[in-house]
Amino acid sequence: MSKILIVAEHDGAKLNPATAKCVSCAKAIADAEIVVAVFAADGAAVAAQAAAVSGVTRVLQVDHPANAHALAATLAPQVAQLAPGYSHVFGPSTTFGKDLMPRVAALLDTPQLSDVMAAESATRFRRPMYAGNAIVTVEVAAGTQLVATVRTASFEAAPAAAAAAPIEAVAVTAELPTHTRFVSVSGARSDRPDLQTAARVVSGGRALGSADNFKILYDLADTLGAAVGASRAAVDAGYAPNDLQVGQTGKIIAPELYLAFGISGAIQHLTGIKDARTIVAVNKDSEAPIFEIADIGLVGDLFQIVPEIARLVSSGK
Amino acid sequence: MKRILVSIKRVVDYNVRVRVKPDGSGVITDGVKMSINPFDEIALEEALRIKEKGLAEEVVVATIGPADCQQQLRTALAMGADRALHVLTDAAIEPPVAAKLLRKLVDKEQPILAILGKQAIDDDCSQTGQMLAALWGRPQATFASKVEINGDKASVTREVDAGLETLEVDLPAVITTDLRLNEPRYVKLPDIMKAKKKPLETLEAASLGVPLQSALQLLKFEAPAARSRGVMVKDAQELVDALKKKGLL
Ligand SMILES: Cc1cc2nc3c(=O)[nH]c(=O)nc-3n(C[C@H](O)[C@H](O)[C@H](O)COP(=O)(O)OP(=O)(O)OC[C@H]3O[C@@H](n4cnc5c(N)ncnc54)[C@H](O)[C@@H]3O)c2cc1C
């Protein structure tokens, strides 16, 4: 039988939906006992949310003042403390999980699989390589403890459970380092849907030309109730903040609807949107590679088309 | 001596459209352009800038892999690295093994910083830097977009899902680079000539006392499910109508 430990991602108050996606990945492994660990300064609220996810058999609440901010160097020894007895240790393939899980794997001296997109059995998984140009089936020897990050775009969040799982408090015995200190985090906390979980995403590329021009995309996004994304070129040029970058080295997303304006469709960008249900591309170049994968394409000037779509949608036409 | 260790990986160039071999045993690399992993170039550039500010005295570049990797080490020397270490092996090296080998190089070189790319664009693992930091028992600042060295500490700004996070770490530490940390310099012809005279030391991987075999078996490679080309519409009205028809508006 598999015993799977999932490291919860949260912001101190709310459980990140990426965690329920890790639970879905773990549920794909037959007969798995699924335990979620919440590391926080005071994890009561988050632990309660984790206990309410269907498939979770137990929640470990690990409270420690050093867990006020998620620092890999501080969390890894605590995860390693809990890990003995588990066959798998999972975390989400977000910047939180990507930072933390390899440090855990090294402390445990286990291999790690990054970006798991399917669990075929307890020992066989699929993951992308080469910016998603190759999908590899990987086998780990039975009996080897495995650390993995779960590609959140590949899994639906596990639903709410009928009854909450039990929550158990665990004390930290691992020695925690002091060589790494949190200073600050800055990000535009907006009222818009989160890019990683939004059903609709409006995305812009280099063609927008300035941060000011990007406003037309925010307006359209607000009309559609969508999140805003961007290509690397748009982020590099300072038109959009870094946390909006979609692609191989940004966020991998799977919205119902992805609207790309003035994005050429470089392979590194397409990797990030392959799992979108419907892709719409607007580009003035009819030869742009984005049209090869778009479900609906429109050749034209985005500066004219974006406001027109917004007008048509808000007038219900 | 204040030294920075930078590790680089030889990978299929980012402009190459990678294809899976028909028999599923891997991807086609014959006759394909190979380059330094773009994130590692950024790592080297950052090390060179730190040295040019007088905050380090030597930049050592290292790679792990077969004899061909010397080309990338020479390029790194031409960019400005002072010397190179080549851990020679024909074995396929997974990140945990790479991290253990780099740990040996850290012992040998005693750097104040090890700078790595945040991921290699071939296996896309994003593991080695974090693993090296764990094995070394030192801080890690991953996905860096800004690095400031202040005496025996560094302040590092990281690109995270929520925006930008700043950490303070004690040195020595491991940093992994994100795209916006810097723009790597171009190599000039005279530098390529000079680089030929710079020291390049080869170490047999097998001599470093690290088991090289991987715990993972790559069973088969497949091309991703293709998305087919959809329909073209002629104006915004048709676009909105098409979305309505799909039930998306
Ligand atoms: C290691 C590495 C990692 C990378 N990771 C990522 C990543 O994660 N995400 C990512 O996006 N990129 C990534 N890239 C960059 C990628 O290769 C491309 O350079 C980038 O995606 C291009 O962005 P773009 O489409 O906005 O710009 P461009 O390629 O310049 O395309 C602009 C497009 O806008 C169109 N256009 C211009 N004006 C108009 C107009 N008025 N109306 C309509 N259309 C117009 C043009 O026809 C063109 O197709 C990475 C690159 C490397 C090397």
Image (cartoon, rainbow, N blue to C red):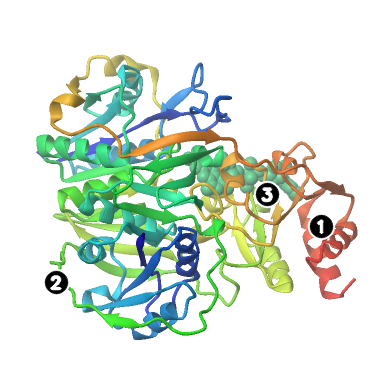
For label 3, being within 8 Å of ligand 1 is answered yes
- Tell me the subunit letter for badge 3: A
Task: Give me the C-alpha separation between circle 1 and circle 3.
Answer: 13 Å
The residue that label 1 is drawn on is A304
Mark 3, other Cα within 10 Å: few <14 / some 14–19 / many ≥20: some
The quadrant of the picture occupied by the C terminus of chain A is bottom right
- How far across and down, in percent of the image, does residue A167 sit? 33, 82
Q: Earlier in the sequence, mark 1 or mark 3?
A: 3
Residue A56 vs A236, above or below: the answer is below
Q: Are marks 2 and 3 in contact (CB under 8 Å)?
A: no
Q: Earlier in the sequence, mark 2 or mark 3?
A: 2
Is residue A189 left or right of A48 when viewed as pictured? Answer: right
Residue name at image x 14 percent, y 29 percent: B208
Q: Nearer the viewer, mark 2 or mark 1?
A: 2
Q: Secondary structure at mark 2?
A: loop
Residue name at image x 48 percent, y 40 percent: A137
Write down the quadrant of residue B59 in the picture: top left
Is residue B37 left or right of A283 when viewed as pictured? Answer: left
Residue B131 vs A42, above or below: the answer is above
